[in-house]
Image (tube, grey):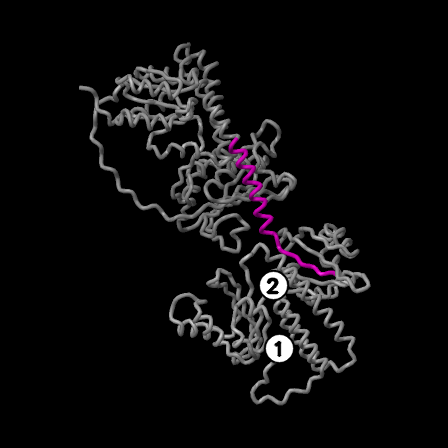
Amino acid sequence: MARKPAPLPDAPPAPVRSPEDLRRYDLLLAGLDLLDQAIAVFDATPKLVTWNRAMVRLLEFPESLMKVGTPFEAFVRFNAERGEYGEGNIEQQIAQRMASVHAFEPHYVERTRPNGKVLAIRGVPIPNLGFVSLWTDVTEQRRYETLIQQQNVLLESRVRERTAELLSAKTELDDIAAALGRSEARLQTIVDSIPALVAYTDASLVYQFVNKGYADWFGLDKEALIGRNIAQVFGAEAYEQIRAHVDRAAAGEQVSYEYVRTGDKGRQVYARSVVVPDVDPNGEVIGLFVLSIDITEQKASEAALVQAQKMEAVGQLTGGLAHDFNNLLTIIMGNLDAAREQVDPAVAADYLDPARRAAERGVELIRRLLTFSRRQTLEPVAVDVGSRIRDFTHLLQRSLSESIHIRTTLPNAPLHALVDPHQLENALLNLAINARDAMPGGGTLSITVSERHIPESQSALVELPVGHYVQIDVADTGTGIEEALLTRVFEPFVTTKPFGQGSGLGLSMVYGFVRQSGGNIRVRSTPGKGTTVTFVLPRTEAPAPVAPEPPRASSDRKPVRCPVLLVEDDPEVRKVIRLQLTELGYPVVEADNGVEAQTMLEHVPDIGLLISDTVMPGGIGGRELVQIARQLRPELPLLLITGYASGQAIAEVQDLDVPILRKPFDRSVLERTLDQLLSHVESPV
């Protein structure tokens, strides 16, 4: 489609153009016609000056509109009348868009056409002359990188070829040079608008062209890059990563690679580059086209995925270990309690009490593993973090040596976080103990609480949703952590302490608690100067005041000591729980699987309480047994027990609205649970 620029009103006659001038202009238009992006230039009135074929193909405008001088409003009206802007008043739609156009401000919008294609629309003003509009089909976003590469390589190649042909001509080039300058300015605007890093070097690897994105990547102006060698711009460390790839490209091979460099403020940034040799007709490499994409966020997402997969594997292993260990600890602790009542108190103090304490430490170890793997059940509430830490530091001082000074910086107004208060105190205690061990000669432990807002620009980087958070910084002036170990401090059983002085689960537990609570954590440390642990927790509103409960009428009635059906597949665990029940005065009937328990429920009417494990062989587990019991005996009190301490395992039976007792438990815990469960059961007359 032939296009000629329209003369401006009352403008002096245009100079006569030679055939070569016209040919050069036609070649420029032909180059634009090869683009997949739709491009149109409008003057200040605004009316159409020039366009490419992609505008007709992508926007499906009729031939009657595609001519020099067509008002911009005509295109808007045509779109409005064919429903491009959706339902609504057509005149209002036109007026709104014309008002935006007359403002001559840069803009970017995306619009879904009725045919399902999504167009990215960018408007770039040309000061005092008009504006350039670009339309891009972004429906297939995953192919966008390849599309950008092909467009830029093709466009650069054609401009260079046409320029070489024009330079070889022996005609006057004054007018065409001015036109080419305007075209190059438009092209530069287009290239600078592309979300990619584009550059061109000569055969000596000296930059001849860069776009704005490429210059910004290195924190320099475009002018500062032109004329400099790649090795100078990259620096020795980063260039060493790409040297072999650049050498291959200079030898005529297209290469792709990834590299990392240290950007502003010491942050590491990642890029993926494609380098295409520029080969002349004689087969000589005369330059290199470089197309790079910033993949820093992608790398962060990949690292987060690897960490999540690692955590899931550890969590699955920990969940199974917790079940088996809790069953074993139930047996050990139950038998120790029974034995302690049968032997001399002195013997119990010397032999049984240490074993009981060791078993309790086993329970704590399992709890820490579950917290690390984010499978521990949390009970988050609105906690005034500043007030909680203020009260906690009084107790914390007793756990630290007198040579350690605790300094707190707390907000004046309350900051509430949605968190489990006991787990928060446990996390702070672990961090304080680590700080104490890192300051054997004394020092300062600083705890700071502040408000933190995560904007959209940082959300992906810190792996948190946009929103308001409470930030807690715990800093010490201790020995610090070596850089090689710093990346592994959250892994279980990794510790900086000498052998035998730490389990390596302290920071792991804190990490699991923070992540499970919806926050994130990081550690900064300088050997010899100290360590700072920073974590954020979701902020929430202050809890509403709770009205006092009315006093309950006192009652001397004791819980009903009814026959209990105990269902547990592990015989040793069943023996311990049976012993506890009989000591509490409950007659016990036993079953080692759900099938046998179902038969007893059908034929033993005296059963007044069902206590069942949640996971059992035979096809009928605790969940199924509860459903069967409710069909056979709707009024029968029910209690589930489980060795799985994870929130997921409990959630699988939580919808049954049945109390759940976690193993291991002692007789006093079982008694309180049964008293509460049977408090509403009427005593027999």
Q: Is residue 325 left or right of residue 18?
A: left
Name the amino acid type tagged 1.
Ala
- Disc 2 from disc 1: Cα separation: 28 Å
From the top left corner, tell me how far across and down residue 588 is, in percent.
32, 15
Q: Quadrant of the N terminus?
A: bottom right
- Is disc 2 placed on a helix, strand or loop? loop
Residue type at the position of mark 2: Ile
**What percent of the width, then of the height, locates residue 558?**
24, 21
Task: Provide residue 589's location: percent of width, then percent of height.
Answer: 33, 15
The residue labelled by disc 2 is: 194
User: Residue at image x 55%, y 76%?
Assistant: 66
Q: Which residues are magenta?
A: 288-316
Whether residue 532 sits left or right of residue 420 in the image: it is right
Tell me if residue 535 can be seen.
yes
Is 116 included in the stretch rendered in magenta? no
- The quadrant of the rendering that contains the C terminus is top left
Residue of label 1: 2
